[in-house]
Amino acid sequence: MKPLAPAPSLVDQVHDALLAEISAGRLAAGQHIVQEQIAARLGVSRQPVQQALLLLRKQGLLREAPGRGLEVAPIDPDAVMQVYELRAAIEGLAARKAALAAQADGGEAARRAGAACIEAGRRAVAAGSLPRMIAADQRFHELLYQLSGNPLLAPAMAAHWTATQRAMGEVLTRDEQPRDIWDQHQRILDAIVAGEPGRAEAEARGHLEQAATFMGERLRNR
């Protein structure tokens, strides 16, 4: 019997709610953050809001505003590029190890789990739902960490997903036709299922490197 995963803490829930608001542009760069207003809107006390704001500040999404407390920080295209460069290296490793692991069962576990992720992603794109597109993309990449069999990858990458979500939201909200990356995800999955570590790593790295270029151009020209 597997232990039950703990429910998200109130701080985590407030953090995720604020991250979603920032990613969707409803809390824009330069906007003043008022703890009391957020606490009232979310129906919580000030303490979890204060802790969530400190975490978002540490992650670079908020910054000190002289005489005004905290405000939403502008997005830094160079920092986004650096996150994607790091992801390309680590997720290339994850895909390689996932393909090696798939050789043991013929890729059946990867096939089942990956197919569900990709179907959810395609439905999100078809529906034009920004939160669903971001969530589906994150689930697919977290699946790579899981399939790799290396328990250090997911926690190592967790901190960088905040910047990724912000960048995706910033770009997707301004694109009339959101970029469909699910064919690329399918190619990564196909290589893993086929048990081809070299191809899996190349597909994963290429996917993230292309995303870095795309995001960088969009953010600099917005």
Image (spheres, helix red, strand yellow):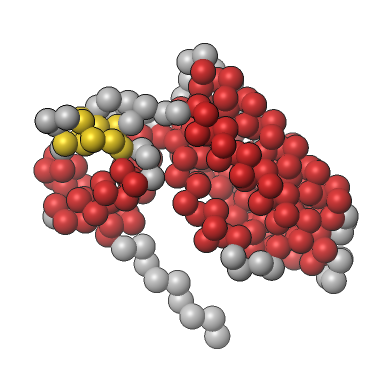
Q: Tell me if I can see residue 222 in this picture.
A: yes
Residue occupying the point 62% across, 50% down: 141
Residue occupying the point 61% across, 44% down: 86
Q: Tell me if I can see residue 115 in this picture.
A: no
Q: Which residue is at the front of the view, 100 or 8?
A: 100
Residue 169 at x, y = what percent? 47, 32
Image vertical order of residue 216 relative to residue 100, above or below: above
204 left or right, relative to 26: right
Q: Which residue is at the front of the view, 5 or 57?
A: 57
Residue 115 at x, y = what percent? 71, 52
Q: Which residue is at the front of the view, 133 or 157?
A: 157
Q: Which residue is at the front of the view, 125 or 205?
A: 205
Residue occupying the point 85% across, 71% down: 104
Image vertical order of residue 8 relative to residue 19, above or below: below
Image vertical order of residue 205 relative to residue 222, above or below: below
Residue 214 at x, y = what percent? 63, 25
Residue occupying the point 82% across, 63% down: 100
